[in-house]
Amino acid sequence: MSLAYQLETNPAIAVQKIQEKTGAPISRSLLDFYIMANGNGCGIMPALSILPSDVKTDKKNKNDSPPQPTLGISGAAIFNSQLKLAGYLNFDEFWVRLWMANKLSTRSFTTVINSIDADKPGGSAEDALSGATSGKTVTVNVDSFKSHITPVFDGGLPKFRIQLEGKGYIEENNSPLNLSKQKNVDKVEVRMNDYLEARVKKVINKVQKEFKTDIFGLGDTIHRRHPYRWKSLAADWETLFPGVELDIRVKVNITGTGITGESLLPTREGGEK
């Protein structure tokens, strides 16, 4: 940890502060890692990256110090039950795990609002995920997250109903929608929920198929609620987890628009009169 960080003398403290700003709980020691591995059967640690200096300056004389690289968090490293590295979730994926574990405190999400939204609420999640340059964007800051995970037993493997909820406000509007009108706020809400649901499902599928490690604590949920059933599942849970069926629903309520109002885009670009 010899890298310099502009805002902290001790780089280890810097890592904790960056985690806190990204809405993640702070992991302070190797003991935290072992406690997590003992409970969930897997371990999760921040993944650090070395970032080059943003400033490039020429040395005026031989005594000048060149700009130094610094560090940043690029996501999370996932370890399996044998504490071997299973893979990485990047910064735009790790929030899914935090949300499901009720450990996410704040995060901003941006979705595309295309012309289809002028005709009906929302539109398809594929449109939102396309990132089409012809679309405009709306950013929602969510500062309240809840997760409800319910195991359901019907025959063989357990199934899970997962309800992810949140509350937030519109932080930025680059779309042609006039957000002083409630009907347009409702359109943004529907589109945002479609977008988040698709993102959550994509990350969960990656974890199940590639990592095959229960980083979401689904096994712990069965253990707490159905301890007798868990006795018959525990030994084979690592094998069973990739095939577990999940019914996922996302509901984020937009509670305010701040001072965001009528679009500044001219009418010829799709803005409302």
Image: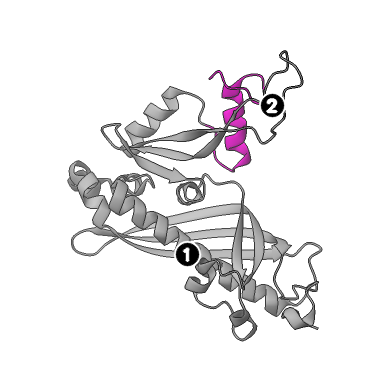
For the point 78% across and 66% down, which residue is it?
260
Which range of residues does the magenta coloring cover?
Answer: 1-26
Q: Amino acid at mark 1?
A: Glu
Q: For residue 3: magenta?
A: yes
Residue 268, quarter of picture: bottom right
Where is residue 45 shown, x and y percent of the image? 44, 33
Numbered label attached to residue 6: 2
Numbered label attached to residue 197: 1
For the point 29% across and 33% down, which residue is it?
84
Q: Colour mode?
A: one colour
Question: In the picture shown, does residue 57 fall above or below 141?
Answer: above
Q: How many marks?
A: 2
Where is residue 253 shown, x and y percent of the image? 62, 65
Give the residue at the far bottom of this rendering.
119
Where is residue 39 shown, x and y percent of the image? 35, 35
For the point 78% across and 82% down, which residue is it?
267
Q: For residue 137: magenta?
A: no
Residue 262, quarter of picture: bottom right
User: In front: 263, or 156?
Assistant: 263
User: In front: 12, or 31?
Assistant: 12
